[in-house]
Image (tube, rainbow, N blue to C red):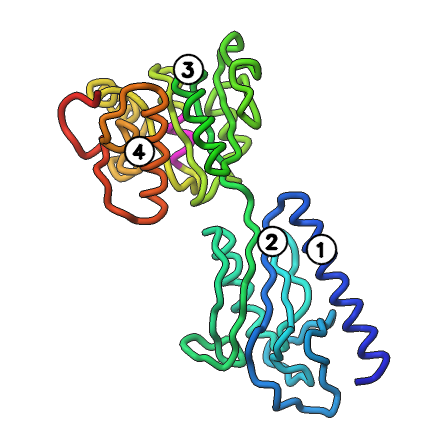
């Protein structure tokens, strides 16, 4: 490998690692895809990258390149920025970038297998995709006693927690020191600002027990991609809330997304026990496990 080629690879590698380090420190979602096994032969020219070297020149789709998928090649993927580096083939880059974005959404890291040009169901190239996703975000509406317990439980599970209530006297950092953010505003206005950022790993929990807050919170959360949406209240309360939601234009299929009464049916009574039942339902929803939900039961919830 020529000195010029080596210098270019080192610069590309430095750029990738610098961007990777910056994203992690800034808690921005980022994925680093690295070929850990693949064919080393088949280069078109005599110029071949050293193992582990990273090119800063990305091949064009369909073009014949002197760079082939090799162990150590890296591709840095970010949701809102162009990818950096290359795995040695433009089509492989495209497919791995697509998969890495999906893995960031799910918050998982794993090894995936492809053909040399990104073909599915082939084992020519093994790529480890290391994902550093944002912390999952839990938005809790209602500055009530149950909120303190739920916010504390969510922090234990690694959530970034936002507590929101339009009543300034209740929504204070002093009452909710465990929260990352305490917002004094109406639910729909907060969701207008942050709704586009909510994804499958995030949760919206409506604990207000007041239709003036419940309805705009649920209506505002439904158009988002949030993975969990739950609302507190008795079955009678939810029946009345459902009527108001339908009046607001919410469809039956949208109502199915609302976990209400919120939580699993584990007999919880105190705020702390109720918080455990809520986060347990969130975990079950994310993992696809079957669990006894209060939503599916009958009779009193306490």
Dot 2 or dot 3, earlier in sequence: 2
Name, please, the residue furthest toward the left. 299
CA distance separating discs 2 and 1: 9 Å
179 is higher (above) or lower (below) than 9: above
Residue tagged by mark 2? 30
133 is higher (above) or lower (below) than 176: below
Kindly identify which numbered label has been placed on residue 271. none
Q: Which residues are magenta?
A: 217-222
**Residue placed most toward the observer, 245 or 15:** 15
CA distance separating discs 4 and 3: 20 Å
Kindly identify which numbered label has been placed on residue 19. 1
Q: Secondary structure at mark 4?
A: strand
Kindly identify which numbered label has been placed on residue 258. 4
Name, please, the residue furthest toward the top. 169
Which residue shows up at 57% across the image and 85% down it? 39
**Quarter placement of the C terminus:** top left
Dot 1 or dot 3, earlier in sequence: 1
Kindly identify which numbered label has been placed on residue 144. 3
């Amino acid at each position: 490998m020529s000195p010029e080629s080596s210098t270019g690879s080192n610069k590309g590698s430095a750029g990738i690692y610098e961007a990777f380090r910056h994203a992690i420190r800034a808690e921005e979602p980022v994925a680093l895809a690295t070929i850990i096994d693949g064919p080393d032969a088949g280069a078109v020219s005599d110029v071949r990258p050293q193992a582990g070297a990273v090119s800063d020149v990305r091949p064009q789709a369909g073009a014949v390149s002197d760079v082939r998928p090799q162990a150590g090649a890296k591709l840095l993927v970010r949701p809102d920025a162009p990818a950096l580096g290359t795995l040695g083939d433009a089509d492989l880059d495209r497919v791995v970038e697509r998969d890495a974005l999906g893995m960031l959404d799910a918050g998982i890291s794993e090894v995936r297998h492809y053909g040399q040009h990104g073909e599915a169901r082939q084992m020519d190239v093994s790529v480890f995709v290391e994902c550093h996703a944002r912390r999952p975000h839990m938005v809790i509406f209602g500055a009530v006693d149950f909120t303190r317990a739920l916010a504390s439980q969510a922090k234990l599970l690694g959530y970034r927690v936002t507590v929101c209530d339009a009543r300034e006297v209740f929504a204070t950092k002093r009452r909710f020191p465990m929260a990352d953010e305490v917002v004094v505003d109406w639910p729909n206005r907060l969701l207008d600002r942050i709704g586009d950022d909510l994804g499958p790993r995030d949760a919206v929990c409506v604990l207000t027990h007041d239709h003036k807050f419940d309805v705009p919170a649920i209506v505002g959360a439904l158009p988002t991609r949030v993975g969990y949406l739950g609302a507190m209240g008795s079955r009678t309360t939810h029946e009345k809330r459902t009527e108001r939601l339908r009046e607001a234009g919410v469809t039956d299929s949208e109502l199915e997304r609302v976990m209400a009464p919120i939580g699993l049916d584990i007999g919880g009574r105190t705020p702390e026990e109720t918080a455990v039942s809520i986060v347990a339902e969130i975990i079950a929803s994310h993992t696809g496990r079957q669990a006894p939900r209060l939503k599916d039961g009958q009779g009193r919830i306490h």
